[in-house]
Each structure stands twice: as C-alpha cells, then as structure tokens.
Image: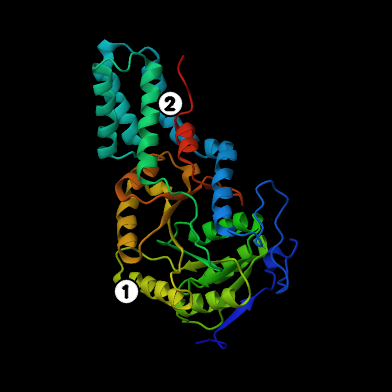
C-alpha cells in the first residue's frame, strides 16, 4: 500500500550546504563512481559480492586511518612493551599481573583478559615462549585468533537481488545517522546507487540531519511529510521506491531507543517485517551502532538488540576518542557477531571497514628486538 500523502522523495539541497556541488536524481542513469582502482560498476554480474570484497580490500589499504584512530588505546597498552623489554623468567608473575591490568583498563573484559594471560603463562612455563618479543607476538596472535574465530565475516553481505536493504539501529546518541551518511558515501564511491530512508520519526531534527547527509553524499532520500508517521511506513515506501526506480542499496535509519524500552524495541520488529513484505529476505544487514566510549557497557545493549531483531554486524563509533579499544574484542567474543565498520574520526572517510589484522597491529604496533 502506498502512502502518497505522507511520504515523498526529497532531492532539494539543504541550505546548510548550498555551496556544495549537487547531484540531481536522473532515473535513466546510475550513480557515477569516483575514479578508483576499487571501482565496482553496478552493471557487473555479482555486483554485491564484488562490492563486499572491494570494501574489505580497502580496509587493508586504509591502515593509517585505523592506526591513528586507536592512538589512545595504543597509549594504554604501551606499558606492555616496557614490561617485556627486559623480561626474564623470574619476573613472569609480576609482568603478567601488570599485563592483565593493562588489558583490563583497555576494556578487553575480565574473561578474555584471564584467557589471554593464562595462555601466555602456560606457554612461558612450558618453554614455548623464551623472550619478550615472542611473548608480544603470542599476545597479538591470541587477540587476532579471538577476533577471527567468531567474527570473520566482516564484509557486507547484501545478497543477489536489488535493492539490498541495510537497516541501522542503536541507542540514542550512538552515531547512527552519522554512520549511515558515511556508509552511503563509501558505497556510492564504489559505484552503488543509494537511497536513504529517514525512519527516525521520533526525533524532530533527525530527518533534517539525514537530508544534510543526502546532500553531502549526492544521494536521494525518502522522508515522512507528516508528523507522527510510522517508521515502518517510511521504510516500506523507501524500499518500494528503491525497487521501482533501480536503486542498488536502500539505507534505512531508525529512531534511537534504549534497549530497555520494550515498546520501542517492538517497533523495530515492525520495521523489519515491513521491509520484508516488500522484498522477501530483507533487510540483508541489520547493523547495530555502538558508542566505543561506553566500553563494556555496550554488551547489554548488543544482547538485547540481537535478541529482538537479530543483529548481523556491529558499527563501533567514536573509537578515536576512546582508550577502550579492547571492547572490540569483547563484543565479538561474547556475541559471535562480526564488527563490520569502525568510526575512527569525524571525516567522511573515517568510517573504516573492519580488518582484524589491521586492528591488532594498530593497538599493538611495536615490536621488540
């Protein structure tokens, strides 16, 4: 059922960005990708498969952004290098106690920290690790194994049918709308034709904020014209437009909500069902945005959202201002859900595809010789 009086396709420029170059909607053309060796054309067979691979490949090429984004966590863990520089067997207990403290301060979590430390202790006492550099390498390998064992599917999985639908969920203030805008920018630069859906119908300024992002990224957007519109109706209409007008991906924003608010969490179920009625199997991805500054406090949120709508991946934001980078490992290990993107800055390109090896090298960057 259509909602012509309630919804519209917005392409007008935001006055806040009136000086930016505009991209007008033309039904006869697809979005023009930027010049890039990672370019993925929408006309290619297996477009979504290629898109996921290219974004994952780009994560390896953007190591510098990941490295700079985790400077505070790295500072916290720098003590490990000092501890291991002059390590000897007699100091094993003291060194491991201090290493344990450094991991806990960086929010690796008690269970993971104990697991890592006890594994190192066993290998040291058995003679497998005989130097500080070997201990450091074993520490990095242990963290990498934790991430790859349960969270290896980090690329976007968008199926084979257009449009693919990505729904963004999370609590208030976590950075959902900003993450959606940055994701739109990244996907559009790889050649995808993007439609945004302003499903945050509770917050008065939410649609305006998303319109600004649509202007910045040159994407189209569907918004509710009337107050008190149902979020599920907005998303349903957006997906219908995406299907009818040849969009590759529909990015669906939703209202921020506390994971303890039952009625609002129920609304997410309605949104998911509404999208699925238009395209069976949609949404292809349900990404939960988590504020990295909350550290281990994000785990209860993640559990509840996953139980209600079935999270397919995490977007961890604001990690550039946090010394709690270990929470990345904690959330993957506990829930077995992969991290898809990391927010490591405020720029358009600072939503980085997650690469476990790059992350580990960013928080443990130094080698002892």
Can residue 346 be seen from the camera position used here? no
Mark 1 → mark 2, Cα distance in angstroms: 45 Å
Q: Which residue: 30% across, 40% down? A: 109
Task: Give the image quarter of residue 22.
Answer: bottom right
The residue to which callout 1 is attached is: 263
Task: Report the residue at 50% width, 60% height from top.
Answer: 158
Where residue 332 sits: x, y (%)?
36, 46
Q: Is residue 354 left or right of residue 114?
A: right
Residue at 32 percent across and 44 percent down: it is: 333
Q: Position of residue 237 (x, y in %)?
A: 53, 79
Tell me if residue 86 comes above or below residue 189 in the rendering.
above
Q: How many marks?
A: 2
Work out whether 364 lies above or below 62: above
Q: Which mark is residue 78?
A: 2
Toward the viewer: 291 or 1? 1
- In percent of width and height, residue 235 lies at 49, 75
Q: Give neighbour class at mark 2: few <14, some 14-19, many 20+ (Cα, 10 Å).
A: some
Disc 2 on helix, strand or loop?
Answer: helix
Q: Residue at x 49, y 87 (%)?
A: 1
Is 188 located above or below residue 103 in the figure?
A: below
Mark 1 and mark 2 lie on one chain; the one further toward the N terminus is 2
Q: Secondary structure at mark 1?
A: helix
Whether residue 111 is situated above or below residue 95 in the rendered picture: below
Q: Is residue 310 visible?
A: yes
| Residue projecting furthest to the front | 45
Residue placed most toward the observer, 96 or 152: 152
Q: Which mark is residue 246?
A: none
Q: Residues within 10 Å of mark 1 (few under 14, many from 20)?
A: few
Residue 299 position, x and y percent, is 32, 51
């Amino acid at each position: 059922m259509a909602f012509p009086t309630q919804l519209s396709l917005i392409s007008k420029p935001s006055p806040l960005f009136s000086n930016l170059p505009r991209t007008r909607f033309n039904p006869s053309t697809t979005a023009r990708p930027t010049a890039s060796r990672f370019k993925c054309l929408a006309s290619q067979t297996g477009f979504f498969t290629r898109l996921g691979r290219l974004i994952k490949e780009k994560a390896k090429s953007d190591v510098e952004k990941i490295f700079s984004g985790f400077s505070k966590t790295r500072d916290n863990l720098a003590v490990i290098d000092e501890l291991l520089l002059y390590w000897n067997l007699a100091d094993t207990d003291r060194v491991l106690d201090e290493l344990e403290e450094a991991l806990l301060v960086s929010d690796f979590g008690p269970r993971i920290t104990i697991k890592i430390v006890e594994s190192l202790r066993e290998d040291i006492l058995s003679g497998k690790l005989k130097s500080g550099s070997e201990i450091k390498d074993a520490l990095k390998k242990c963290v990498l194994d934790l991430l790859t064992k349960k969270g290896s599917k980090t690329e976007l999985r968008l199926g084979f049918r257009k449009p693919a639908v990505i729904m963004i969920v999370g609590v208030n203030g976590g950075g959902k709308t900003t993450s959606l805008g940055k994701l739109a920018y990244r996907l559009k630069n790889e050649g995808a034709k993007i439609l945004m859906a302003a499903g945050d119908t509770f917050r008065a300024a939410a649609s305006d904020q998303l319109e600004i992002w649509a202007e910045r990224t040159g994407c189209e957007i569907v918004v509710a014209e009337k107050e008190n519109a149902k979020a599920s109706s907005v998303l349903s209409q957006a997906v219908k437009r995406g299907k009818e007008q040849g969009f590759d991906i529909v990015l669906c924003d939703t209202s921020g909500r506390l994971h303890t608010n039952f009625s609002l969490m129920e609304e997410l179920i309605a949104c998911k069902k509404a999208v699925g009625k238009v395209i069976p199997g949609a949404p292809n991805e349900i990404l939960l945005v988590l504020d990295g500054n909350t550290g281990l406090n994000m785990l209860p949120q993640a559990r509840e959202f996953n139980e209600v709508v079935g999270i397919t991946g995490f977007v961890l934001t604001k990690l550039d201002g946090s010394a709690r980078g270990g929470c990345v490992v904690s959330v993957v290990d506990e829930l077995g859900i992969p991290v898809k993107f990391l927010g490591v800055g405020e720029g358009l390109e600072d939503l980085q595809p997650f690469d476990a090896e790059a992350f580990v090298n960013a928080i443990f960057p130094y080698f002892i010789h």
